[in-house]
Amino acid sequence: MISGADVNGRVLYQEGDHSFIWLGADPNLKRGVVQTNQYLIIDKGRGTLVDPGGVHLFSRVVAVVSRFININDIDTIIFSHQDPDVSSGIALWLGVTSAKIYVSSLWLRFLPHFGIVDTSRVLGIEDTASSLNLAGGNRLRFVPAHFLHSTGNYTVFDDASKIMFSGDIGAAVFPEGDEYVFVEDFDEHVKLMETFHRRYMAGNAVLRKWVSLIKSLGPSMICPQHGAIFREDTAGRFLDWLDGLRCGTDDLDSLYQMGKDV
Amino acid sequence: MISGADVNGRVLYQEGDHSFIWLGADPNLKRGVVQTNQYLIIDKGRGTLVDPGGVHLFSRVVAVVSRFININDIDTIIFSHQDPDVSSGIALWLGVTSAKIYVSSLWLRFLPHFGIVDTSRVLGIEDTASSLNLAGGNRLRFVPAHFLHSTGNYTVFDDASKIMFSGDIGAAVFPEGDEYVFVEDFDEHVKLMETFHRRYMAGNAVLRKWVSLIKSLGPSMICPQHGAIFREDTAGRFLDWLDGLRCGTDDLDSLYQMGKDV
């Protein structure tokens, strides 16, 4: 159960003028709609939003962000990929901020289909840089996570806090009312992740590529877009679990069964 | 160049009370926005829309559909997958029709993030049937196309016309103003498909699974969501080309390069 206080978010890291913030739980989450996490990184008074979410979360996320920073000071928004729960709020966010949006260049021509979008403010990650220098001199790194699950997919590593934003990797599906912020019992938590990862992640060889990049960075926490946050030893156990997971196209025959009528 | 008349669509097949219709080109397509095709299947006076498209196409698609059938007679909408160019118009389509929407059950919890969506009218394909019986007794088959590119992805085969709707498989990116409806010169057309398929499709083994299912169905045409339609011998050449294509995770090392700063 998420406590009432967590509706307003939690500071995961703060040191000097750099902070990494989890933007809280949605108290109005409806049955049948996937729960999402949003994150805010503040560096020397300038804000970066990571996967700020879909249209129907917009007003809640604006309200929580405003507790930590003036909306006008958000200058960067990162979308890990093109799914509606990540990016359908794009036109609204472009409207209330003057931020630039970073996303895999694979989706640049697709995002305008969400509605009225000023494409000059949407930048393809491959076309610009593999990392982003923040106002205070700190750096965010875009770490490829293609086909996990999205074809063009980036996870984000914050050098200062060593927090890894992992997008859909690490997603857990909670039973209603049983949400929690941090993974405490890894063995129990795996049960909430297993079905999703086995079906959505493209294959074990791809997972292993991502895990090896992440291990080389030595993250202090791993923060997914759905589910709960991994700290210290649960982060390591999570990476080891992924490393051995058979998934997606590893079993093509079951994936490509035609229905019984055919 | 698409002719002026093609703004209003083309009947690809008509026999008795069954027809398969391409819903025309968008005369206002903006630079940097991917071109999309929409299709309408009419069976005994009832309509099925396939990938009707994003928010900004909605009024044009409604207008063209209305040339062929009363909007009230649309009872089925199929989304091949969750991308915004396919499905961001979901709330608008639910509003103007009483249709049920079919999509891979992988996206049922994600689509509500597009906005206000009556989830009782959105059905997961795996949870319902592998095919759909139409009003006139004809049948549409949902053919798995997972990881090509979307994780949960269906192509659609119309038994009566033997037309295959292939979603993103077969997509071509036209130089501006050089769009055409049917593929005539396959060797030239491949140049417009190659970059997209090499990057977005998950791997050759996956493509080959899909190709073998499609070949067993013997399609008369293959109709993609972007690009041009394959008929007769170009359909066969297209399937052979896919069968040998190295793509996506086949070259993991290049896909998982970190940027040079890291």
Image: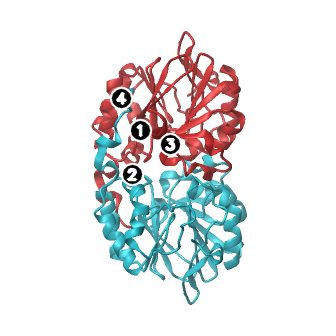
Chain colours: A cyan, B red
Residue assigned mark 4: B214
Please tell me whether residue A246 is drawn above or below residue B15 in the rendered image: below
Residue A113 appears in the figure: yes
Q: Nearer the viewer, mark 4 or mark 2?
A: 2
Please tell me whether residue A210 is drawn above or below residue B215 in the rendered image: below
Q: Secondary structure at mark 2?
A: helix
Q: Which mark is residue B81?
A: 3
Percent coordinates x, y for residue B1 in the rendering: 55, 28
How far apart in space, not on screen, are marks 4 and 3 (Cα)? 18 Å
Name the residue rendered at 43%, 22% in the picture: B221
How far apart in space, not on screen, are marks 3 and 1 (Cα)? 20 Å
Instruction: Say whether disc 3 or disc 1 marks the residue closer to the N-terminus.
Output: 3
Q: Which mark is residue B193?
A: 1
Q: Quadrant of the N terminus of chain A?
A: bottom right
Q: Nearer the viewer, mark 1 or mark 2?
A: 2
Q: Nearer the viewer, mark 1 or mark 4?
A: 4
Residue assigned mark 2: A199
How far apart in space, not on screen, are marks 1 and 4 (Cα)? 19 Å
Residue type, label 2: Arg
Q: Secondary structure at mark 3?
A: loop
Residue type, label 4: Ile
Count of all numbered marks drawn on residues in the image:
4
Does residue A57 appear to the left or right of A159 in the view shown?
Answer: right
Q: Residues within 10 Å of mark 1 (few under 14, many from 20)?
A: some
Q: Are marks 4 and 3 in contact (CB under 8 Å)?
A: no
Q: Secondary structure at mark 4?
A: helix
Residue type, label 3: His
